[in-house]
Image (tube, helix red, strand yellow):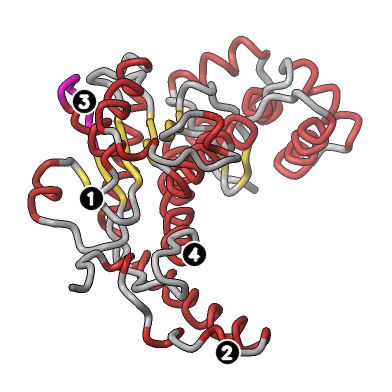
Amino acid sequence: MQDKRLTEQRNPKSSGIDLLSSVEIVDLINSEDRLVSEAVGKERETIALAMDLAVAAFRKGGRLIYVGAGTSGRLGVLDAAEMPPTFGTDPEMVRGVMAGGLPALVEAQEGAEDSPEEGGKALEALAVGSKDFVFGIASSGTTPFVHGALEKARSFGATTGILLCTPPPEELVKGHDVVVAPLVGPEVITGSTRMKAGTATKLVLNTITTGAMVRMGKVFGNLMVDLQVTCAKLKDRGERILMETLGLRRKAAEVLLEEAKGSVKAAIVMGRLDVNREEAVRLLEEAEGQVGRVVGDLP
């Protein structure tokens, strides 16, 4: 009997892939990958809801916590890890939890995903509470570790959601605050969800966190302004942002950034409104971190 999960079904278009040339394999995979963006686009409303839930959690002082196993878990950990260098967030703001722990990032931990109890324990270890939004990632929709974690999270009063790439059963939709289900179709290699399902997952997670960070005031125009200068690359980026938004030369931007103690957002407000750092910080706090609400639009 054929597996009902879309992620486990055979793709008739690739049934003879083992006899194709290299360029034919590239063309086949590329043609299937083109279906991913469309599938993600059809989930625009549920992705937007997940974004809203993340923003609500952040504004309450809570966290966005991804939970997954295998490829899904790695993608969650990756997205979480990219938030501090990209948006200057506290590492606790977005967390990634995966079955098997950190060793599973680089080496498969067979059987780790099969225990719902371990998923629950992982959430207990993070002291999950009612302020948090816990988002499970399970391409097949059936990963026990993920469901155990989500069940524990709900028992603690957390908001919950899940991302899967197969039609969600009704009880799953009813059991969570949001269910995102981009239906990318069977994989080119049967069951290899690191392919289309993995690509769809990365697109969805990128959209949720990027949009949430925009809503939280981490972006001015389309510039990543909420960064702290902690290395040469970020110092250069910060100075270039000030040069563009304030019309400064490099040296003046460098001096202003130093006066702002490495905060690009504060430096923009200081330069636009001719105020000191303390006043800039106060104005930003009143505006919930939104630079545009303090200084207006980009020139």
Say which amino acid is labelled 2. Answer: Leu
Q: Earlier in the sequence, mark 3 or mark 2?
A: 2
Numbered disc 2: secondary structure:
helix
Q: Reply above or below: 130 against 105.
A: above
Q: CA distance from mark 2 to mark 4?
A: 20 Å
Q: Count neighbours of disc 3 (C-alpha within 10 A) and say few if under 14, some if 14 to 19, many if 20 or more.
A: many
Total marks in image:
4
Residue for badge 2: 19
Where residue 232 appears, as percent x and y from the top left, is: 84, 30
Quadrant occupied by the N terminus? bottom left
Question: Is 119 included in the stretch rendered in magenta?
Answer: no
From which residue to which does the magenta span run?
A: 155-160
Q: Earlier in the sequence, mark 3 or mark 1?
A: 3
Q: Nearer the viewer, residue 64 or 226?
A: 64
Say which amino acid is labelled 3. Answer: Lys
Q: Earlier in the sequence, mark 2 or mark 4?
A: 2
Residue for badge 4: 195
Q: Nearer the viewer, residue 209 or 195?
A: 195
Which tag is nearer the camera, tag 2 or tag 4?
Answer: 2
Looking at the rendered structure, which numbered label has been put on residue 179? 1
